[in-house]
Image (tube, rainbow, N blue to C red):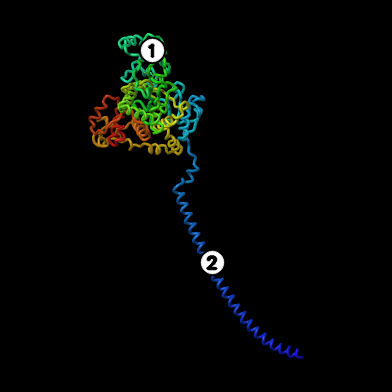
Amino acid sequence: MVTNETQNLNEGEDEALNNNVVDKQKHTDVQKDKEVQIIQNKFKRRLENSFTNIFFLVCIAGISLGILLEIVNVVRRNHTPEVSTVTKIVLSPKYWMYPNTKTVNSRDGNLKHVHLVLERLGYEKTTNETPWNLLWSYPTPFNDINLKNLRDNQKVNHFPGTGYITCKVELATSKSEFIPKAFRLPKDKNEFLTYAEKNKDALFVQKNIRHRHVYLKNVSEIDLSNETTFVQEFVQKPFLVDGHKFDIGVYVVLESVNPLRVYWYKGDVLFRYCPTKYYPFDPNNLDKYVIGDDYLPTWEVPSLAHPYTALGNTMKETFDIYARSKGKDTTKMWQDVQAAIAEIFIMKESIIADKFKAYSSPENYFEMMRFDLIVDEDLKVYLLEANMGPNLSSQHFPPNQLLYEQVLYNLFSLTGVAQAKITVNAADKGETKAAEDMLAADKNIAVYGDECRTLCKDSCEVSDLCRLCKPCLTPKLKKTLLAAYNEFLHRGDFRRLIPPTMVPNKDTKAILEGVKDLSLNNKLLHLWYQGKCNQDITWCS
Ligand SMILES: Nc1ncnc2c1ncn2[C@@H]1O[C@H](COP(=O)(O)OP(=O)(O)OP(=O)(O)O)[C@@H](O)[C@H]1O
């Protein structure tokens, strides 16, 4: 029973207890619910906060990306060409090498640097079968190939008639204070004997009319009947560097005759020294007085090695430094070098112009030559020869690569060969005139504006100056002046030899007086340079 009562009690108590527990439980559940809700709320808020943050982050990232992309686009627009020009084919000008031999055509042959420089300028090698823009011929090509009628965009590295300058005996027998007296054999045999008789101290070399075979001989030893040779007075007492005789090779470019335009390369000059010291002199030892293939280069002459190699001077400046160290001023020597070369062109112009009559415009041709000169102990200048197609191979002396490539680069720039890419591509798009004007236009060649406005306003015949006014220009003269303007713009290290250096001068009477003895075309070109020199002194030389 107890058990029942107890059980009842217990049941009652249990109930009460249960009620209490239930209440408590309820309370606890409510509490829990509240807590859960709080937690849920907190979580919700956090979640909401996180969403807001993520949303903001995404927005900021999006904006940043947008800004970044825009910056990239702006940079690309400013720094890379339009897609159309990148994919567009750019045409290459073409060069043709003649003759088709290994030494000429191979990129490792004698003309290696010609190939290299042309390729760097965007040229492609071709043959006569396809259209070409430049013909580079090793020998003079005019006897082998008909080059009389060329298109405007074709150039040849030779000029018809320059043989009158580069033929050794022709040059040696030209009358000039800068050329040692020479006699043709057997033609001038008697004249030579008379001269030798009168000039007892004179010595003579017998030379081959082509190249090499230069020997100092007594008059009695000279074979006066040998028509493949000529005799020339020997220049005694040469200026020596560390005891070595030397010669000077100056690169010169003929651009036009009638009117005459000639340039010399002032960037450097080839100095070649005899391998053996001059004294004690021995006529049987050619290494003492004849410069040949195995010459001593500047960098091997003891006193020149430091200024040339360590200090990095040109061969020309290295020599000048040496001469100054010996108390010599080379200014007059270099003026005489220019005078000696210019004189030859002036002397031979009419005969070359005569030969040139059968050819198209001078703008199609140019000729680079190397003039060889020697100097005596007073730095008096003597001109010995002009080499057509001078050696440009650095095989024997690799350091000469720089000289040859710079000479070639400047040559191609001066002659317009380097600019062919512009005209070739413009022609392809039918923009030839615009491209030509871009290089040189009417306004670039206008001179004597005051005289053209007043003195010449009614007639082109009033004065030679008037012929340079725009309304009076003939098409040929205009072409000449545009070419001369282009040469000035692209001359690099070449400088004008003819027409010569001038000074600004506004006295038109005096200017006209100064050119009165020139042929009409040369007169007009001189007057034009004077007009440009008056506008801007950089045009005076
Ligand atoms: N009249 C001269 N007086 C003094 N030296 C001379 C004379 N003629 C030639 N020589 C010497 O001989 C060298 C070669 O002469 P020249 O240039 O006439 O002949 P070359 O064999 O054709 O030479 P290059 O290698 O220049 O073609 C000259 O650099 C000079 O040193």
Residue drawn 32% across the image and 9% down it: 197
In front here: 232 or 68?
232
Mark 1 or 2, nearer chain start: 2
Q: Which residue is the site of mark 2?
A: 51
Amino acid at circle 1: Lys
Give the quadrant of ligand 1. Answer: top left
Q: Secondary structure at mark 2?
A: helix
Q: Identify whether 352 is placed above or below 412.
A: above
Q: Is mark 2 within 8 Å of ligand 1?
A: no
Estimate the x, y position of residue 331 in percent, counting from the top left.
30, 28
Q: Quadrant of residue 266?
A: top left
Taking the image as shown, residue 84 lies to the left or right of residue 281, namely: right
Q: Quadrant of the N terminus?
A: bottom right
Amino acid at circle 2: Phe
Residue drawn 28% across the image and 36% down it: 535
Asked if labels 2 and 1 touch by Cβ distance under 8 angstroms, the answer is no
Estimate the x, y position of residue 213 in percent, counting from the top left.
43, 16
Which of discs 1 and 2 lies nearer the camera? The answer is: 1
Task: For label 1, count other residues whose C-alpha is less than 10 Å away and answer few (under 14), some (14-19) or many (20+).
Answer: some
Estimate the x, y position of residue 105 in percent, counting from the top left.
50, 27
Outermost residue toward the right in this view: 1
Taking the image as shown, residue 454 lies to the left or right of residue 251, namely: left
Count of number-bearing discs: 2
Q: Residue 259, which numbered label?
A: none
Q: Is mark 1 within 8 Å of ligand 1?
A: no
Q: Which residue is the site of mark 1?
A: 217
Q: Quadrant of the C terminus?
A: top left
What is the distance, in whole Å, between disc 1 and disc 2 at their CAs?
A: 109 Å
Q: Secondary structure at mark 1?
A: strand
In front here: 482 or 122?
122
Q: Quadrant of residue 354?
A: top left
Q: Quadrant of residue 203?
A: top left
